[in-house]
Amino acid sequence: MPEDRKPGPSSPFLHDATLLGHAGRDLPARGGRAVNPPVVRASTVVFDSLADWTDAMPRRMEPDFMQYGRFGTPSHFALNDALARLEGAEAALALPSGLAAIVATYLAFLGPGDHALVADTVYAPNRNCCNGLLKRIGVETTFYDPAVGAGIAELIRPETKLIFLEAPGSLTFEMQDVPAIAEAARARGVVTAIDNTWATPLYFKPLAHGVDVSIMAGTKYVVGHSDAMLGTIATDAPHYERIKKTIHELGYAVGPDDAWLALRGLRTLAVRLARHHETGLRLAEWLQGRSEVARVFHPALPGDPGHALWRRDFAGACGLFGLELQPVPEAAVAALVDGLELFGIGASWGGYESLVLPTRPEKLRSAVPWSGRGPTLRLHAGLEDPQDLIDDLAAGFERLRAVAG
Ligand SMILES: *Cc1c(COP(=O)(O)O)cnc(C)c1O
């Protein structure tokens, strides 16, 4: 393989923005002197001799050994390497979707008779997995109040094997005291995993806060352009072995083109997130001042119930937040949303474009019933000029008023 290039930067003390530009570029098969590593597509990998083939078999657990396409090519290894450095983890893995990363983590640590503690505010399909697949294989789930903090200790049973966190929570953005929960779990030998899609490791580093397994829907800000599905898992060596074995058993494989898109997304993550943070907060502040809005759910707002935890543990916010309108008929919400010109109506987020979606938290909470009275929405602030987004929303409120009276 052509090794005619200088190795990448060796300092372990580089800032994240620098890592984003340099990590994952000093691996083999990187395409001569091109800045970006090439896409390496492979199913079959051929070996020179029977002895080489036999030697290769056990090496497929290694993070950068190409034995068969399903276990990854240099395109995946470059992404995994960059993710691990960013997360401060010993190893990271790309998976076919964010949900696939969540499910693989559950299956790695839970089996019949085991018990899982899962935050009441997790991503809805995560909750469905607990109530469906996990239940079918004999795993019991208790959904806990995300505000539980160190009180999680009282919910841990002898058969509790995993605690799942998500901060802030999906749709309603409640913060969690992650270090307190992680410490209580560690004291009892329970594995912790967190869905860190919202903050990304740029704004919150789960492993540095005591969590064992850091998960992201890379589909969102890592890919960043709404054009590929990807999940990520980052962890330390003992948990990595178990997760990787489970992924091999599941047969998950990520296309090398998607891995390449994710690595390219990482290069601009720092600048994109800074802008999403700024615009999201500006919209949230403006919405807070509107009489049509009952509450804005955004932990970076000083009045938010999760603000102190966000300030203590997080280095920034992304562009995703929620709001509750004053009670109005559904037709008034439709008038607001349907006429928006810059906000698309659709699932997912984390791309360059703004989005809006009605939410139904009342259907997705069991530990703490939803107390809101008005319709709720989720907004994603994209990379557009914030004033244009505000003007679009302002026109939307005019339409809402025209219908609601
Ligand atoms: C979107 C999302 C996921 C799932 O990611 P997919 O790539 O769509 O499977 C998981 N967690 C959170 C918080 C999400 O927003």
Image: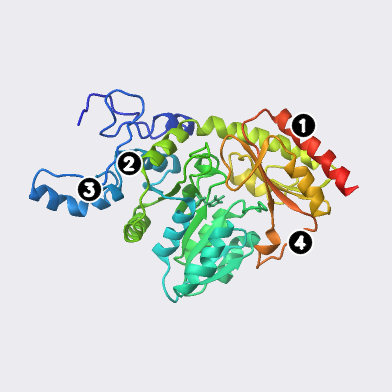
Q: Out of 351 and 116, give the one closest to the viewer.
A: 351
Task: Say few, some or many: other residues with alpha carbon within 10 Å of mark 3 (under 14 / 14 to 19 / 20 or more).
Answer: many
Q: Earlier in the sequence, mark 2 or mark 3?
A: 3
Residue 391 numbered tag: 1
Where residue 196 appears, as percent x and y from the top left, is 53, 49
Q: Earlier in the sequence, mark 4 or mark 3?
A: 3
To which residue does mark 3 refer?
A: 67
Where residue 158 appears, as percent x and y from the top left, is 47, 75
Q: Earlier in the sequence, mark 1 or mark 4?
A: 4
Q: CA distance from mark 4 to mark 2?
A: 46 Å
Q: Give the amino acid at mark 1.
A: Asp
To which residue does mark 2 refer?
A: 77
Q: Residue at x 38, y 52 (%)?
A: 236
Q: CA distance from mark 2 to mark 3?
A: 12 Å
Q: Out of 274 and 342, give the one closest to the viewer.
A: 342
Disc 2 is placed on an element classified as helix
Image quadrant where one finds the N terminus? top left
To which residue does mark 4 refer?
A: 371
Q: Evaluate if marks 1 and 2 touch, with contact meaning CB atoms under 8 Å apart.
A: no
